[in-house]
Structures are given as C-alpha cells and as structure tokens.
Amino acid sequence: NIMILFGPPGAGKGTHGPKIEDMLAIPQLSTGDMLRAAVAAKTEVGLKAAAVMKAGGLVSDDIVIGIIRDRIREADCKFGFILDGFPRTLVQAKELDKMLSEEGACVTKVVELQVPDEVLEERICGRWIHKKSGRSYHVKYAPPKSMKKDGEGNPIPESMTDDETGEALMQRPDDTASALVKRLAGYHGETVPILKHYAPGGIVSEVNANQGMDGVWGEVLSALKRGG
Ligand code: AP5
Ligand code: ZN
C-alpha cells in the first residue's frame, strides 16, 4: 500500500491523511510537516527552506527527495505509507518510482482531491494548526472546542488551543492570500502534470473535495476500496 494524497493547498490532504493512517495503520508522510519541523529546529535543511516556504515557492527537488528517501527506509514504512505533498514535480515522481522499484515496490494508488481554486483562500486563511501533531482546524469549518470570538466575530487568538493537548494553535506563515497565489501557480504548473505520469497505470481516483468534510471522507473511502 503506497498511496499519494494529491491536491492543491487547502484541498484536505492534512485533514484526511491522519484518518487513512488510523484506518490502514500505515504512516502519513507529509513533506510540508517535515520541512516545518526542520525550520523550527533550524537544521541546515530548515534554514535553506524557510524563506522559500514562506513565500509559497517550492523547495528544491534535491532537498525533498533526500528527506523522503531517508524517511521511507524507516521500519514503520515497511507495510506501506501515505504520501502527502510529495511528489510535487515530475522529477520527484520519477525519482520516487526509482527508489521504490529498487525495493520491488511501486505507487499503488493516487487519490486526487479536486477543489476549484476560488474556495481555497477561505480554507487557507481560516486555518489554525497544532504544530507538534500537524492537526489542522478552521475558524468556520472545524473550530477547536476552546474557540471564543470577539465583538466583531473574529476568533480571539489566545482562545485557539488544540482539543487534545490544550496547547496553543498557530497560523502558518505561508497561509496568506499572496503566498497562496504562488502556491497555486506552482500546483497547476509543476504538480498537476504528475497526474499524467500515473494515469496510464489506472491508479488515479478523483474525489470531489468541494463539499463538507464527511462527504469528502466518504468518497475517499470508496476510492480506497476501488483497489489499486
Ligand atoms: P504543504 O504543507 O504540503 O502545503 P500544501 O500542499 O500547500 O497543502 P496544505 O497543507 O495547505 O493543504 P491541505 O490539503 O493539507 O489542507 P488541510 O487538510 O490542512 O507544503 C508547504 C510548503 O512546503 C510548500 O509550499 C513548499 O514550499 C514546501 N514543500 C512541501 N512539500 C514539497 C515538495 N514535495 N517539493 C517542494 N516543496 C515542498 O485543509 C485546509 C483547511 O481547510 C483546514 O483549516 C481544514 O480544516 C479546512 N478544510 C479541509 N477540508 C475541508 C472541507 N471539505 N470543507 C471545509 N473546510 C475544509
Ligand atoms: Zn497539509
């Protein structure tokens, strides 16, 4: 089971990935989460990636390929894994194929979360995350239990805490309207072409991700059942 969760920024990869992880008992590997951890830890990779990420650009192929190569060799990936945010360029996709074929494996499923660009700004700009776990909330669609609003209806930042740990939530530095424009350009220019690379294998399933989260999850489940 080696699956790719595919979709634009705000599509719901981070929302549904952890649920697939629980269901199939294979880890979700998010290059975005790994890079944010590297930025927070100020590692060499983190120092290189921080500015690019904040502006909404793509981190170099060499860096992310290196991160994934190391990660999929770990013991918990032996029975498969869910890729979130990788591959993002044709170079990354081909390199992934190569890494997997060395182990006699290949990508078995691509779940494409389809959402029109117009709805993504509201999703991205309303998102708050729990940094340590990667859990994401939304001021309107998935508010934390603790959320309180001020007189104008805006969430009070101090009231935004994680349901499970009670720790503070934060907003991502790249979750701005201007960085989103750049992220979307990268998605359509560099990432969408990857779908053509996987289509001949008949492993791509499209999901309508422009509906409530439960509806999306139902379609993800049927996509997974369709095999591959
Ligand atoms: P990454 O972290 O991968 O960001 P992304 O691809 O832009 O995706 P997001 O995390 O924004 O979206 P998501 O689909 O996970 O949305 P979520 O479920 O949280 O990458 C960040 C950066 O790292 C990149 O820009 C790049 O710089 C770098 N990077 C990472 N991987 C790389 C690679 N391979 N190569 C090069 N660079 C790389 O949902 C969003 C919000 O909407 C949440 O608030 C959620 O609650 C809400 N929501 C979800 N579903 C619904 C719904 N159905 N209805 C209403 N609200 C919903
Ligand atoms: Zn994400």
Image (tube, rainbow, N blue to C red):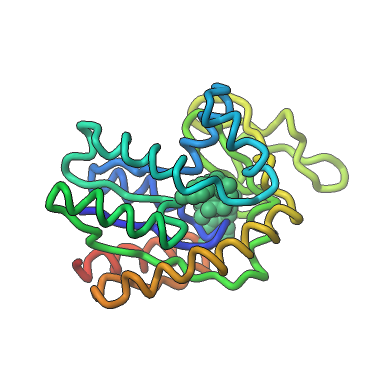
Query: From where the camera sits, is residue 123 visible?
Result: yes
* Count of marks overlaid on the render: 0
Query: From where the camera sits, is residue 15 visible?
Result: no
Residue at x 41%, y 71% (from the top left corner) = 207
Locate residue 77 relative to residue 90 in the image: left or right: left
Residue at x 54%, y 43% (from the top left corner) = 136
* Residue sitting farthest toward the right: 151
Query: Relative to 172, does residue 165 appear above or below in the rendering?
Result: above
The image quadrant of residue 120 is bottom right
Frontmost residue, 2 versus 220 = 2
Q: Position of residue 221 (x, y in %)?
A: 30, 63
Query: Relative to 166, does residue 58 appear above or below in the rendering?
Result: below
Locate residue 15 relative to residue 23 in the image: left or right: right
- Name the quadrant of the C terminus: bottom left
Query: Relative to 34, does residue 167 appear above or below in the rendering?
Result: above
Residue at x 27%, y 77% (from the top left corner) = 200
Q: Position of residue 110 (x, y in %)?
A: 33, 64
* Residue sitting farthest toward the left: 104
Q: Position of residue 199 (x, y in %)?
A: 32, 75
Q: Position of residue 124 (x, y in %)?
A: 65, 53
Query: Relative to 203, does residue 186 appear above or below in the rendering?
Result: above
Frontmost residue, 43 versus 224 = 43
Residue at x 70%, y 31% (from the top left corner) = 159
Locate residue 205 relative to residue 211 in the image: left or right: left
Frontmost residue, 206 versus 181 = 181
